Amino acid sequence: MTDADQVRDQIRDDAVEAALGKLDLDTKAFLLAGQDMWSLPAIPAIGLQSLVMSDGPIGVRGVRWTADDPSVALPSPTSLAAAWDPELARRAGRLLAQEARRKGVHVLLAPTVNLHRSPLGGRHFECYSEDPYLTGAIGSGYVNGVQDGGVGTTVKHFVGNDAETDRFTVDSVIAPRPLRELYLAPFEAIVANAHPWGIMTAYNQVNGTTMTEHRYLVNEVLRGEWGFDGCNVSDWMAARSTTGDILGGMDVAMPGPTTVYGPALAEAVRAGEVPGSAVDDAVRNVLRLAARVGALEGAPAVVETAPDPVDGQALARELAARGFVLVRNEEGVLPLDASAGRTVALLGAAARDARVLGGGSATVFPERVVSPLDGLTAALPEGALAYAVGADPSEEPTPADKGFELLALCRDASGAVLGEGGLPTGQVQWIGDDLPAGATYEAMASIEVRGTFVPRESGEHTFGTRGLGAFTLAVDGRHLWSGVQEMGDEADPFEAFFGAPSERARVTLTEGEPVEVSLTYQVPDMTAMPLKAIMFSLLHLGPRRDPDELIAEAVEAARAADTAVVVVATTERVESEGFDRPDLGLPGRQDDLVRAVAAVNPNTVVVVNAGSPVELPWREDVAAVLLTWFPGQEGGAALADVLLGEAEPGGRLPTTWPARFADAPVTEVVPADGRLEYGEGLFIGYRAYEKHGVVPAYPFGHGLGYTDWAYESLEATADAVRVRVTNTGTRPGREVVQVYLAPLDTASDRAGSTTVERPASWLAGFASVAAGPGESVETEIPLPARAFEIWDEEARGWRRIGGAYEVRASRAHGDTRLTATLDIA
Ligand code: BGC
C-alpha cells in the first residue's frame, strides 16, 4: 500500500466514524436490513446513498431479473478456472465492474469459491475447482479485477455450501484439517491476496452452527485470524435470528424489507440481549463498504476514475476459447482442415439452441447469444455446413421464447388494466418494486401473459407453467386448462424459480400460422410475505419427433460430411442452483447419437457443453473431445475460432473428469438426519483418485493445445521453482506449467515423529506461459509457505512439515515431465 493510499484509508475511516457518530440506534438497525431485494436504505442525513447489490458471477444482472435489461454473459466459472490464469480472471473482473457501474450496482454478489467436492453439486458449474489453491488464485484475480473498477465483491458462500440438497438447513460436518486445508483455504487466500470488501455467509450449518451465526468462523477466523475488514452479507433469506446473527458477526440481513434486523435489532439492544457495540461494528462495516465504493459523502472512493473501457463481446469470446479444454485429439483431427470443398455436419439440439450459462441466481440475460450453428455458419464457406438436431436433451417445456411475442397485462379485481410490460420470453420475474408502471401489489388481482405464437414446426406443441398459484391457459381462443400449483413439502423458497415445469396441454399447430396465447395468473395476497415478488412462466415445447428418426437423419448428414461435430449438453433441469444431480449421465438419447455418428464418420468431434463433469462412455471411439463448459454469450463464435484453428483451446481441467460416476470420490450429497458428513476428509478430487488408485477419464490439469512443449529444466528452492519450456511445434501456443509437491517421507513428520496423513501429492503453484514456434520461456513459480504446512488443531495453528519432497513440473496431475528433490527444514 502506498503512502497516498494510507492517507486515503485514514480519511475514509474518519468519515466512517463521523457518520456513525451521527446515527441513533433505530437508524443503525434500519441500515443493516435490506430495504428490498437488492439494496440497503439511503440515509441522506449522513450523505449515504443506497448500496445496490447484484448477482454474479458471470455477469451483472442488475436489480431487474428480466431479459429486457441485458448484461454481458461471460463463460461459467468452471471455464474461467480452466484457463489457469489469474490475470485473465482479473480482466473478467474489470469487465464486470464496468457492467456494474453501467447498471448502478455497487457490490457484485460473487465469486463463488466453494469447492468441487462432488460432481453432483448443482452449483458445480458456478464454482472454480476441486483444488483450494487454484480456486484461491482464480478467485483472487477475479476480486482484484472487480475491485480495480471500484466495485465491491462478496466472496461466497462462506463456508461448506458445496452441494444444494437441503441447503437452508444441512449441517456440513467437516473435521478441522479439511475445513482449514480445503474449504476455508480459498477464502483465506482471497482475503490475503485481494482484500475483498465483502463476504456472503452461507445458508447451511457447519459442525452444528448455522453460518450466519457462526461466531468462531466469522469473528475469530475470518475477522480475527485473517484480518478481514469488509462487510458480511447474509445469503438471501439465510438470516434467521436477530441476536444469533448480530453476535455471529453478520452485518447485513438480505433481502428486505422484512428481516431479523431493523426494528427487531433495535429492540434486542434495548432489551439488553445485544450490546450496542455489536450493532456499531456492523454499521461501521457497512459504512466502510459504502466509503470504498464511493457511496458515502466526504469519503474518497477507492477508485475515483473508472478504468479504461473493455469490449465485453470481444472479452467474452476470448475467455471462452481460453477456457475450452481439448481432452482428446487423435491424429490431430483438430484444428479442422477448412480448405475448399471440405464439409462439416453439425449435430445436436444445443448446437442450435445454445446453452451458454447455468441455472439459478447466476442467470443473466445477454443481449445476444452466438450458438455453435451461428458461429460455424459465419465462419465456413457457403455450402460447407449441414445441420441436424440428432437428439434433444430436453423433454420438458421451457419458457416460451422463439416465435413468441408476448406482453404482460396487470389487472385489478374489476378487470381494469393497471399497467402493462413487454416480455422478451414467457418468464415473468418481478421482484420488489420492479413492476410495470401503474401496477402495485395491493391493487393487482391478476396478470395475463398474452400474445401471438408463430410455430417454427407443424405438429403437436406442448404448453405448460412454472410457478405456484392459480392459472388459466388458453391457446388459439380455446380454454385448455385451469388449476392451482401448490408448493411441495420440502420446497426451496425459490421453488417458483427453479421448480419443476408442469405440462398443461397439447395443441396441434401449423408451421408459420400465428395463434393467440394467454396465461392468466391470480395474484395472491402478499401482505404477510417477507419478500414481494411475482415469479411464474408460460412454458412451451415444440413437436417431439421420433428419437430414432432424429438419430438416423443425423447419421445420414454425418456420413455425407468430411467431419461430424456433435454438440452434447446438459439442460437447466440438470445443472442449476437449488438442487443436485442424481448422476452424471447426459440427458436424452445423446450418447446413442454420438455412438451412431462415430460409427459412420471417423472424424467425429464431440463438443461437450456442460458446466461440470458428465460421463462420456464413447470417448475412446471418437476422434476428438472438446469441453466448452457453459461458454457464455459468444460461445459459438469462440467454438468456430477453436475448431478452425483461429485460436488455440487454452484450458486445462480444473477438476478431475471421472470415467464413471461411481469412480467419483464423493457420490453422496444427500444429508442423513440433516447432517452431511465430509467423511472423506482431505481426499477430494485428484487427492482421492491418487489415494485409491482410480484412473479417471481425464486427470486434473489435463488439456491439449495445438502445439507441443518440451520441459527443458527445473530448479527448485523452498520459495520458488524455475521451469524452462520450449514450444517445439509449428504454431504459437500457451502452456500451463503445473508444480506439484509429493512428500517423500510418507506420512511421517520428522520433527515430531507423529504420523501425519497427507495426500500423495498436491498442487503448489502454476504459471501460464506463451511462446512462438521454437521459442523457449523460463518462468518462476513461487511456492507458498502454506504448501508445506498442515493445520494443527491442537496448537490452533499451521505447522510446517519438514523432510524431503519431490517437486514435479507437470503438464497435468500424473503427467510429470521433470522432477527435483527439496529438503525442507
Ligand atoms: C444464492 C446466492 C445469491 C442470492 C441472491 C441465493 O439463493 O445462494 O448465491 O447471490 O440468492 O440472488
Image (cartoon, grey):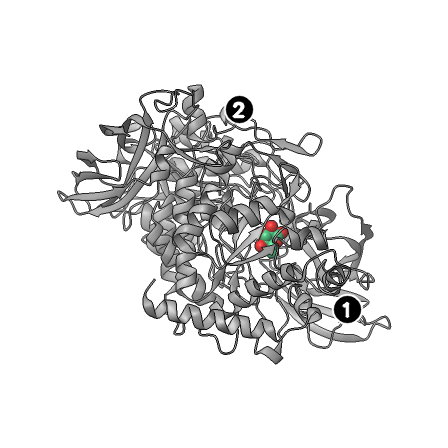
Q: Are marks 1 and 2 in contact (CB under 8 Å)?
A: no
Name the residue tied to disc 1.
Answer: 441
SS for dot 1 = loop
For residue 717, what is the image quadrant? top left
In the image, what residue occupies the spot 39% across and 63% down? 148
Observer-nearest of 402 and 536: 536
**Residue 150 visible to an observer of this rendering:** yes
Observer-nearest of 492 and 800: 800
Measured along the vertical axis of the image, is residue 106 above or below residue 572?
A: below
Quadrant housing the C terminus:
top left
**Residue 382 visible to an observer of this rendering:** no
Tell me which numbered mark, 1 or 2, is placed earlier along the sequence. Answer: 1
> Disc 2 residue type?
Ala
Name the residue tied to disc 2.
Answer: 662
Q: How would you rate the neighbour count of disc 2 (Cα within 10 Å): few for under 14, some for 14-19, many for 20 or more?
A: few
Residue 782 image offset from top left, x and y in percent: 28, 43
Residue 285 image offset from top left, x and y in percent: 55, 62
For residue 725, what is the image quadrant? top left
Looking at the image, residue 366 sits to the left or right of residue 733; the answer is: right
Label 1 vs label 2: CA separation?
A: 49 Å
